Image (cartoon, rainbow, N blue to C red):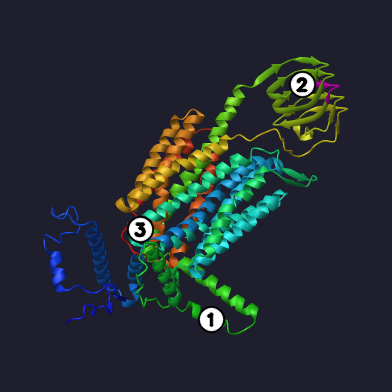
Amino acid sequence: MEDPYQNNVTQPGPDGYPYQTDFPAKDEEDAASDATEGHDEGEQMYEGEYQGIPHPDEIKEARRAARMEARRKARQEAQLEDEDDLPDQYENIMEDCGHGRFQWTLFAVLGLALMADGVDSYVVGFVLPSAEKDMCITNADKGMLGLLVYVAMLAGALVWGGLSDKLGRRKVLIYVLTIDIVFSFLSCFAQGYGFFLFFRFCSGFGIGGSIPIVYTYFAEFLQIEKRGEHLSWLCMFWMLGGLYASFTAWGIIPHYGWGFAIGTEVQFHGWRAFILVCTFPAIAALVGVIFMPESPRFLLENARHDEAWMILRNVHDTNWKAKGEPERVFTVTNIKTPQTQEDEFIEIQSETGTAFQRWTVRHTTLLQQVMSNVMSLSAAELRLQGLFLVIVWFCLAFSYHGLGVWFPDMIKYMQYEEYEAKTRVFHRERVERFHFNFSLVNQIHREGEYIHDKFEDIEMRSVKFEHSLFENCYFEDIRSTNTFFENCTLKNTVFYNTDLWEEKFKDCRMENTTFLHPKKGCHLNFQEENDIVIYLVSFLGSLAVLPGNIISALFMDKIGRIKIIGGSMLGSAACSFLLLLSFSQGAVICWQCLFYAVSVAAWNGLQVISVEVYPTAKRATAFGILNAVCKFAAIIGSFIFASFIGITRIVPIFLAIAALACGGLLALKLPETREKVLS
């Protein structure tokens, strides 16, 4: 009698590597009985079998077979050698490993790292209204802070993206998060503007490398049919970072009263606590990444076969045990790896010379390898699609970040116009021996006379005195905001413990005027709260991204990356045109939310295609360059769009429309990577 378990031996699998069957082979009679029309009486049947409708599992298997056949033909046409089979073999291994608990754990960890980047993009804008009072920051200094943070992120994207292709995705991501956490923490306690600027620059340099590393890292653990959708879901964490920053800023920053000070030199107020809270996502991500493995695809590209095999086996076992199939065995015994000589050169040098010489050789070699990687991206086969990607990235970032600055600034300008329209004007008033013990708000006093008057313990907000006379007046404990004296005459007047110093008096004539204990510089007003509109606008803008993110994730693998990018950018151009019809704060906020909801799909598609179009050895380097282009476009767009606030809205809106339309049309020329394995 034939042994039914005789086929339970190692056999070559369909993908070219051996596997172990875990079940006995069927007898011919059993196989034949399954093929009969009636089936066994107690066996459940697929509902559409009699109508000739294929089972969903059969459809999935047919699609996989079609993809494999297409790849096989492509290899034959290109006459690829055996050593180049790693992409297909790796794809087959990832399909056998499945998509489950391991990928979802990595998804959460890398999502927190992406969330940290999103939070850092909002920090400066939220803290400036408070920090400028706390550290006496001028308008020029505020512009310098925003500019340097973007420049730091640009440099970080270039440096860390290149290093992650040589040192590893996990290792470099740990460096990136650590730098961000350390310098963000230090910036909480920086009392001087110079130190604060330096710490925020270093923090931006660190977190600037997170985006190219995160997407590259996660993509290399995904099979082809999951890649587009799950990379798009990952994009949602950037939006969550905006929501987190907006919500915590609204809850912490506007209220100054609970802060504390040590003398006059050390102050800790709400905005500093906000920066501290903003480090929490990065801390959580760092802890998670420490327990994650390196990308096995990176290890294979660097001929570290054994490490990669152990990680892939762990991914396989983790996923199938979580699905209730612990008996599944990881059957891969050999994985092809490309030949590399770079590490050999470093190891040879590590055996000789002093410690400093070995350090110098290692880092010089590493720098040469990174630069070689960057220069090789201009190879003929990558030049055209790389140029197209750069232009599309630039157009989208220029419009998105430019309008991102324009929206809140336009709302502030509308508030200012509305405030100015309510300004009370007093002309040629004469006030004598009067005690001003109430605040003066939003007033203009022209050609007035104030004789023997007393101004005591009051606030002057948006007050201007023009061509007025102050004679024998007394000012004490005055808190002022946007208050000035122009072309006034002051005689025998005393200013005691006020922040009305000489710079507040423009072209004024003073006779026997005394300033006692002046509060020079800027000082916090503990009764004043920041306008919550700045937080509300950012919160609603981030929340509006949610539906666009969900839709793009669901359709990324169904209609393709190119149609998603092109359609989203052209739709965003149409939304930008509607901004010409916004004549109120509510309308601006409404069109802002619509613009963000439509444009997010283009961001998702660009990030997915940027991961897929470049080879593994250059993937993070290329993504870093594209992300640096994004930051450069953001700098230019922010500067141009902000310069037209209060002048005209037509120029920035038409610039946004033109950039989005050109980028959307050019995106249709990019290669579709939906069915492309990671090369």
Kind of residue at badge 3: Lys
Which residue lies most toward the bottom here? 352
- Distance between mark 3 and mark 2 Cα atoms: 73 Å
In this picture, is 459 found above or below 430?
A: below
Prevalent SS, magenta region: strand
| Location of residue 481 (image quadrant) | top right
Q: Residue at x 64, y 38 (%)?
A: 254
Kind of residue at badge 1: Glu
Q: Which mark is residue 468?
A: 2
- Asked whether residue 611 is in view, the answer is yes
Foreground pick, 179 / 359: 179
Which residue lies most toward the front here? 42
Q: Residue at x 40, y 37 (%)?
A: 575
**N-terminal-most mark, 3 or 2:** 3
Q: Is residue 222 left or right of residue 250?
A: left
The mark closer to the camera, 1 or 3, is 3
Q: In the picture, which quadrant includes the C terminus?
A: bottom left
**N-terminal-most mark, 1 or 3:** 3
- Asked whether residue 646 is in view, the answer is no
Q: Which mark is residue 226?
A: 3
Residue segment shown in magenta:
469-474
Graded by Cα atoms within 10 Å as few (under 14), some (14 to 19) or many (20 or more), the crowding at tag 1 reads few
| Location of residue 180 (image quadrant) | bottom right
The mark closer to the camera, 3 or 2, is 3
- The secondary element bearing badge 1 is classed as helix
**Residue under circle 1?**
347
- Distance between mark 1 and mark 3 Cα atoms: 38 Å
| Location of residue 247 (image quadrant) | top right
**N-terminal-most mark, 1 or 2:** 1
- The secondary element bearing badge 2 is classed as loop
